[in-house]
Image: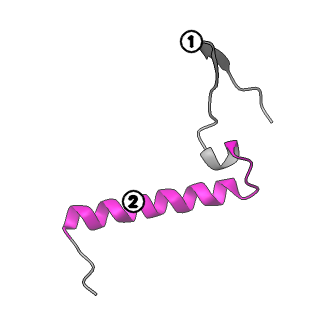
Amino acid sequence: MSKRKTRSIDGVEIHEGSGNVYADLGYSNADEMLVKAKLVSRIADIVRDKGLTLDI
């Protein structure tokens, strides 16, 4: 694991994230999980931009 920056704000230790929350949480398939999350987010943006709805 690479050395991440650490600092303190008002007595609280803050660790800089890696840019992948799944890796920061220790998931073994973190890269795959991040790709899936980005894909779902992009699909949601497209659906919203097109004004689509789900009518069940």
Q: Are marks 2 and 1 in contact (CB under 8 Å)?
A: no
Q: Could you tell me the amino acid type at mark 1?
A: Asp
Give the number of the disc on residue 10. 1
- x, y (%) of residue 10? 56, 12
Q: Quarter of the image for the C terminus: give it.
A: bottom left
Circle 2 residue: 42
Residue 36 position by quadrant: bottom right
Q: Which residue is at 71% across, 26% downward?
A: 4
Q: What are the residue bounds of the magenta stretch?
A: 24-51
Q: Could you tell me the amino acid type at mark 2?
A: Arg
45 vs 38, left or right, is left
State the CA–CA distance, disc 2 to disc 1. 37 Å
How many residues crowd around disc 1 within 10 Å: few (fewer than 14), some, or many (20 or more)? few
Point out the residue furthest to the bottom here.
56
- x, y (%) of residue 27? 73, 54
25 vs 41, left or right, is right
SS state under label 1: loop
Q: Which residue is at 64% across, 15% downward?
A: 7
The dominant secondary structure in magenta is: helix
Residue 25 belongs to the span the image colors magenta: yes
Q: Quarter of the image for the N terminus: give it.
A: top right
